[in-house]
Image (cartoon, grey):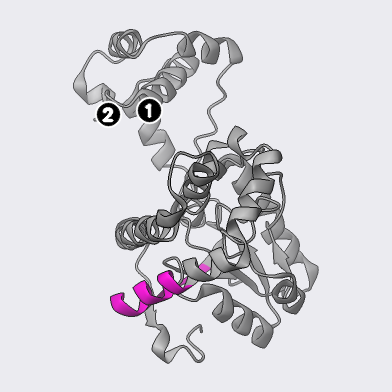
Amino acid sequence: MSRKRIHVITGCTAVGKTELALRWAEAHGAEIVSCDSLLFYRGMDIGTAKPTAEERARVPHHLIDVCEPSEPMDIARYCDRARAVVEQLSARQAAGVPILVTGGSGFYLKAFFAPVVDRVAVPEEIRTAVAALSLDEAVAELRRLNPSEAALGGLDLANPRRVARALERCLATGKTVAELRREFAAQPSLFADYELRLTELVREPDDLARRVRERVAAMLRAGLLDEVHGLLTRGIKENPSAAGAIGYRESIAVLEGRAPLAELEAQIVRNTLALVKKQKTFFRAMLPEHERVDLRQWVDVLP
């Protein structure tokens, strides 16, 4: 029996994923599963270019507006929710509801193709003890548990977060960093039992840059600063992932008097174009071989 299928479309910010996804889903009776790391948050609408209520009325969407802006969504929670939604859609009819995953957030997108969560259970007492260590102390303990460079597996010992994460897992399991990495790499991907068809949408650099500039201008006209002002009252700064997102961090700086309003639009454009560059690198390096489609010929681009 052939495996059930998931269609995935990705592409850089502002490339045009939303409209293409809607058209394809309407044509095929599909439902859309988001893998955008900011669409989870209620109230973060303008700055994320979230599909509008009218667009979501055209096609059912999943994993949008599932938590408050003050409540971080992590990759483990996302994987659990995405798997549950996909299984629900697959089981709804004998042949399954066509599933279209769309978004450009690299780590969440990668979850469909490769392991991204190690699932090592770290007791709270270990987490607390590691958090109390300085970086030098944590590195010394990590070296004691990993007595060779090979055992450390090339870990970046200057990165406090990675050192802490590695030390927690070594203490919890009694294994070296290299052993944990080998076990992690040997895990099946979350959707190994599905056939995945990946398409990346692309545009010429000048065209994409123009669309970024137009999108940022439209967001500001639509009331981005008012949206961010409201989100500050809802605790967005308690969630570093949300508060640090492009469009939001720059707006927060303006509202708090740390940056001039006159430079807001240009700063968001610069940071968005830098993100686009990172996205292109990620898609090339971290995703499996896939079709790339220039959206100048976007009719029927998905099989």
Asked if residue 80 is positioned above or below residue 184 in the image, the reply reads: below
- Part of the protein shown in magenta: 196-214
> Which amino acid is tagged 1?
Arg
What residue lies at 65% left-to-right and 69% top-to-bottom? 51
The answer to whether residue 219 is magenta is: no
Residue 55's spot in the image, x, y percent?
A: 70, 75
What residue lies at 54% left-to-right and 64% top-to-bottom? 220
Quadrant location, the N terminus: bottom right
Residue behind mark 1: 162
- Classify mark 1: helix, strand or loop: helix
* Residue 87 visible in the snapshot: yes
Q: Residue furthest left?
A: 149
Left or right relative to 49: residue 166? left
Left or right relative to 152: residue 201? right
- Classify mark 2: helix, strand or loop: loop
Residue 261's spot in the image, x, y percent?
A: 47, 52
> Which amino acid is tagged 2?
Asp
Of 203 and 301, nearer the camera is: 203
Residue 43's spot in the image, x, y percent?
A: 69, 53
Q: Are marks 1 and 2 in contact (CB under 8 Å)?
A: yes
Quarter of the figure with residue 35: bottom right
* Residue 102 visible in the snapshot: no
**Among numbered discs 1 and 2, the one appearing first in the sequence:** 2
Of 179 and 228, nearer the camera is: 228
Instruction: Give the numbered dot on residue 135.
Output: none
Of 63 and 252, nearer the camera is: 252
Specify few, some or many for label 2: CA neighbours under 10 Å numbering under 14, 14-19, or 20 or more.
Answer: few
Residue behind mark 2: 156
Asked if residue 221 is positioned above or below residue 258 in the image, the reply reads: below
Specify few, some or many for label 1: CA neighbours under 10 Å numbering under 14, 14-19, or 20 or more.
Answer: few
Quarter of the figure with residue 100: bottom right
Q: CA distance from mark 1 to mark 2?
A: 7 Å
